[in-house]
Image (cartoon, rainbow, N blue to C red):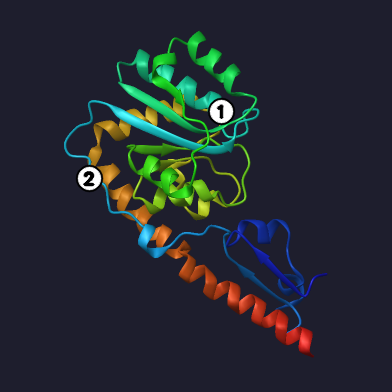
Amino acid sequence: KSNGVSYVTQNFLQERYPSMARIEGASKYRFEEYYSSIELLEEELGNEKHYGNSLDRISISHVSNTISGNGKGHRTLIEMVSILKKDGINAAVKFVGDGDHVTELRNYAKHLGVEERVEFLGRLPERKTVLEFIASSDIFVYPTYSEGLPRCLIEAMAVGLPCLSTPVGGIPELIESKYLLSPDDSIGFAKSIERLIANPSELDIMSKKNLEVARNYTKEKLDERRKRFYSQLRRLAEV
């Protein structure tokens, strides 16, 4: 029944939780807007990555501030690395974040024989460091089970990284469906990595497209939508 509603997604949450503007029609009394809570500056956008003719080793990054349970797909990634190792692919994953599940995940990596290819970096001190870490890797893989619109995924796209993720929440608004898999499909993620390694030109294309999408989420562009939304609220309050 709110007069104005703002969403982080462009369509997904609106369809699940429709505003009165959507139900009754937009007017000066009923309106909605969308903008992410990400604070991405124009100057933080990276460059397109180029992968050459082959990749002898692939570095995979994943960011989740709190590591508790498996909601962000940590186990899937560890299983994926194990599959890649068995298939002769030199792949390693680095996790940013910390929490009560880290010890269990380390033990799981050891159980699968990939402890030397799985690293937990803890929480990094500032967002600039996180962006630098993501940019230093080859691909961002995020097998999350539930999301609105993940900032970490937009940040990875913003530094030119190819991304694999899951078709949950607003993620399909960011990434093409062929790069989205079930969050527990460790085999599917591994096969996708193997296919991309064999076709590095596709990684180049993914990098370019992801940068184009991320440009729509810079602070400058999102502030325009925020200003529009709050200006409508202000006008309504003055009536």
Residue at image x 24%, y 38%? 200
Report x, y in % for residue 226.
59, 72
Type of amino acid at the residue the image marks with label 2: His
- Disc 1 crowd rating (10 Å Cα; few below 14, some 14-19, many 20+) is many
Type of amino acid at the residue the image marks with label 1: Asp
Report x, y in % for residue 178.
42, 43
Residue at image x 65%, y 30%? 68
- Seen in the image, is 103 located left or right of residue 178? right
Residue at image x 39%, y 53%? 158
Q: Quadrant of residue 12?
A: bottom right
Picture layout, residue 178 above or below residue 43 = above
Q: Quadrant of residue 201?
A: top left
**119 and 70: which is toward the camera:** 119
Report x, y in % for residue 40.
46, 59
Q: Are marks 2 and 1 in contact (CB under 8 Å)?
A: no
Hey, which residue is sitting farthest bottom in the picture?
Answer: 239
Hey, which residue is sitting farthest left in the picture?
Answer: 53
Q: Which residue is mark 2?
A: 50
Picture layout, residue 13 above or below residue 61 = below
